[in-house]
Image (tube, grey):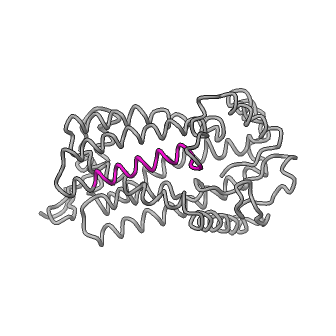
Amino acid sequence: MPALPATTALSSTVADAVAAGPTMLAAVSVGSIPLSDSIIWIAIAAFVVAMALEWSGNVDLARYVAAGAWVVFGVFWLTMVPHYYLEVKSPIETMLTLAALPLCAYTGYLLVQGRESLLLLSKAVAFMGLIYLPVETIPFVKTWLIETTAAQTHFGMELFGHSPGIEEGANGYQSRFAFDPDETVTGRTTYIVVSCTGIGSMAIFGGLIAAVKAPLKRKGAAFALAISVIWFLNLVRNVFIGLASPWGWFQQDIFVYIVTEYMGAPANRTSYLVSHNFIAQSLSIVALLGITYLVLRILPEVVEPLEDVLYILTGSEYDLADALGQEVRADGGERTPDAER
């Protein structure tokens, strides 16, 4: 949920972006298509091809195609670094995007070296992309999701006694909360974008659940649980940021100093940046870990791709099923140490 900055602040940000020159890869286009969009479509297409090759029994070729897909996937995240650093000004997201390329390249290396289990994680990424990209690229789907999320967030604000109304935001959608009719005064007005809808987190869990082999009933239950919890927590997050920013809940001197001196942002965006980039994003990590645990209780098969993620990050093998006190039965169920055998 971006804050709509004052006109002078916006001009400053654009000037910074122009000054960045070659680093602004995300702004480059291939024809009418942004470079980053072209790269991510190529990556997801390669993941889908690798998935098809594995399904057809050509595992070795699938590994090499998936390895290439991971490298392209990493390059995509590299193109997004300027966006998160210069525009979003999110330390967490900037660090994650910077780390993505070496981690993705290492994943490709492991596939080339013969770690076939990573094909399951590659399949999960393919499904994630197939869930997320249509929302990002099909206009009517994107419009519906953004404007529905804005309406639901506004309803949440009304429960707390605030009814600012909704008007057209800087992104062209009916998604801006009209607390500040003249945004050049405070620069604190917020509006909903795709990342505020929770679709990214939904795609992650949807991809993991779709990739593993398990009874459809349990996969459906895990998916319903994950989506409903993400939707609710995302709504709470949006309401919190949407109220904290215009009302200046975090406009204290210490926060203003950090935002202006260390992030190069205008002082009037302090409440937005603190509530969004620090509080909400930090709590989102905790929430994702909690949702992962709940999903694992229903669908323990998801431990396999998660164990590979931990291996990529640490270089060590982990037995998450044992740590959680679960085992996956041959029939796709689970058993616990206390259960009768």
Give the main secondary structure of the magenta stretch.
helix
Furthest toward the bottom, the residue is 217
Where is residue 115 shown, x and y percent of the image?
21, 40
**Which stretch did the figure color magenta?**
32-51
Q: Is residue 41 above or below residue 311?
A: below
Measured as percent of width and height from the top left, residue 64 is found at 26, 41
Question: What residue is drawn where x is 74% and y is 59%?
Answer: 176
Q: Does residue 146 appear to the left or right of 324 in the view shown?
A: right
x 24%, y 52%: residue: 325
Asked if 7 appears above or below 333 in the picture, the reply is above
Q: Quick check: is 47 in the magenta stretch?
A: yes
Q: Residue 148 or 280: which is nearer the viewer?
A: 148
Answer with the quarter of the image where residue 22 lies: top right
Classify residue 19 as left or right of residue 331. right
* Depth check, front residue: 338 or 183: 183
- The residue shown at (66%, 46%) is 275
Please state if 265 lies on the left or on the right of 28 as rendered: right
Give residue 322's position: percent from left, percent from top.
Answer: 22, 48
Q: Quadrant of the C terminus?
A: bottom left
Q: Is residue 290 above or below residue 87?
A: below
Residue 63 screen position, x and y as percent: 24, 43
